[in-house]
Amino acid sequence: MAMPDGWLTQLPAPAGTLEPVQRRGRLALAEQGFPNRKQESWRLTDLTRLEALFELSLSDQRNLPSPADSLPSVPEQVLRLVIDGSQDPLQGVTLPAGISQLEGAELQQALGHTLSCCRCASDWPVELNHGVSQQILALRIRGNVPPVELVMLAANARLVPTRVLLLVEEKAELELLQVVSAQGQAAHSHLLEIHLGQESKVNHGLLALGDGQEALLANLAVEQESRSHYSLVSVTQGWSFGRLEPSVVQVDGLASTSIHGLSVTAADEQFAVHTAMRFEGPEGTLDQVQKTIAADRSHSIFNGAIQVPRPAQRTNASQLSRNLLLSGRARVDAKPELEIVADDVRCTHGATVTQLQEDQLFYLRSRGITQSSAAALLLRGYCKEVLDRLPLDASKRWLGGSLQVGGVTS
Amino acid sequence: MIRPDAEPLLEINDLHASVEDKPILNGVNLQVKAGEIHAVMGRNGSGKSTLSKVLAGHPAYRVTSGSVRYLGRDLLELEPEERSRLGVFLGFQYPIEIPGVSNLEFLRVSTNARREKQGKEELDTFDFDDHVRDRLQVVQMDPAFLERSVNEGFSGGEKKRNEILQMALLDPVVAILDETDSGLDIDALRIVAGGVNQLASPDNCTLLITHYQRLLDEIIPDYVHVMGAGRILRTGGSELALELEKIGYDWVDQQLAAEGVA
């Protein structure tokens, strides 16, 4: 299926730092066409919602009321950068010691390197971002720097493309919280690359909150050198259509990766999480837990790929997919996808799909707690494991410590 | 403590109940008055645990006939949470683990639900903290357990202590303890039993469901009932438990056979 008529040709002419990338993306989109359900990774996707993205405006958001005015306060030591696809996020910002902007040849050299390592450079959502991103936030991280909060905003029925590149140098440490927020039937196309040098450490939180009518396409590509530690905690809620695709590669092994996710869907939302983890060297570890809560008529999808080729001996990986259905009409599709060639490895995986446990509900009710409060307590307990891991006190500051799930505050 | 003039707190009349359409209770009759401790004994499958769950309002059990009056009102028409708030407490044989829910918060919410019904002021976080630490002494429980998720990773004995801690906080009128002694070593049994004895008063009553005499060495019942085939077959004083220890339950089969039940 071809891209919608005339959409590519009406895009602004390629320009700026990302000109070559824009050309590449547009060419790829013209060649690939529009995804179809015969492609495995799109098999379960409601493509009509993806098509709806092409009806959104790509014009910038300048001169419109900015949702940035109503953001929660940020702790003093945290560097907050707001990205809305139009303003320069670094305008008027003094970067703290250890954080510097990547520019010129250095930027061109780094751009797309991690995407290639993760083998996701040609994925359709990535090429879409390539085709439409007008600017990039590219930072080098040296040493132990203050925490960074990246707030990405979309509103007013616009498709907001954002691209971020982080080069985390050897032995550097970064605490990063990304907050992706959308209102007014807007959509995000987000692309993030993180390169972790040897012995570096990144504690990464992604909190993506829609308003029920919005769309999110987010690709996170992470490349780890040896003895680096990468932790991703993602919490998503409120996307009419969403797709979160973290891809992590340990290029030399001997690194540790932790991925914890919580995806909450309600009404007729559809949200998919496709994670890909590849070990290219020995003695790497992965600890992954992906949770979903699906209420009403919503549809939650999880696909967790783990690749352990022959050089990745003594890999130790565990993946658990836990899915909670709050309604008989909600749907969950969970698929672990392990590809193990190395013979001396420990890889475990599991998937559960359950409803709220009757015995747990009765236990709480037998202690005077009403059915609805008992359900809320159980949901809170279910979410807590992930919410508490978000960095920078994000759960409290951005969510007030709880999520609204299926009509109850968890 | 038997007082002929004591108020009946719980009156069970000809109670029949089933689970998944299988009859389990077949005409239970029992009256429990204020100040009394009753022990309900019997073999596995005799209906003891079903009786406790029916009294607490477990939704999987369906009452098919009979009645239960609690403080003069129809207990069976009340939701489980309402029963608890009015003072009916079930100590679970297998306390449920609830990951992610703080034990302290759970105890505070349930205690306040009961206190509201008692016309007492709700306790805020600080006052509750003092209150719960005082009540911990009843079961000699480590305060560290308050910070953990409800029953998660607790040993069998710790779970049972947590049940009696809940009993101490909820100040029940009728406490039904389902196999509280199972899984306890001798020391833990003494601590748990000591807690139950401390909480027993002339104003409340206790229904102990147990297999073994050893619990009744620590908590002396006023009445012992033997259940079989879903009803009470025999009632006596505490000496009946000692007799059962000697003669076992073979007589139950004979009695039921004579009645044409088994």
Image (cartoon, coloured by chain):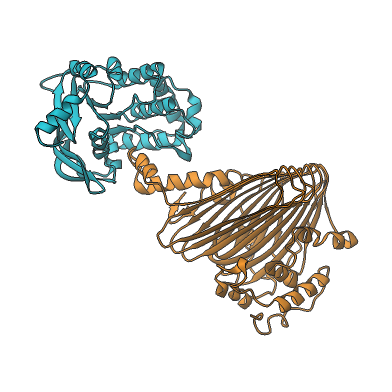
Chain colours: A orange, B cyan
What residue is at 42 percent from the left and 19 percent from the top? B140
Q: Quadrant of the N terminus of chain A?
A: bottom right
Q: In the rendered view, tell whether residue A378 sits above or below residue B124.
A: below
Give the x, y percent position of residue B231: 16, 34
Residue at 30% of width from left, 30% of height from top? B178
Q: B51 and B258: which one is in front?
A: B258
Seen from the viewer's position, the closer of residues A87 and A248 is A248
Residue A130 screen position, x and y as percent: 75, 69
Q: Is residue B121 left or right of residue A394?
A: left
Q: Is residue B39 above or below residue A89?
A: above
Please state which of residues A250 and A107 is positioned toward the viewer in this rendering: A250
Residue A375's spot in the image, x, y percent? Answer: 40, 48
Q: In this orientation, does residue B31 appear?
A: no
Q: Left or right: where does residue B37 sit relative to residue A162?
A: left
Q: Report the number of discs.
A: 0
Residue B82: in sight, yes or no?
Answer: yes
**Picture quadrant of residue A328:** bottom left
Residue B105, image quadrant: top left
Residue B62 x, y percent position in the rendering: 23, 46
In the depicted structure, whether residue A179 falls above or below residue B221 = below
Q: Nearer the viewer, residue A259 or A184?
A: A259
Q: Residue at x 19, y 30 (%)?
A: B227
Q: Quadrant of residue B229?
A: top left
* Horizontal side, residue A12 vs residue A377: left or right: right
Residue sitting farthest toward the right: A105
Q: Is residue A105 left or right of residue A1?
A: right
* Residue at image point 12% right, 29% down: B255
Against B6, residue A282 (above or below) is below
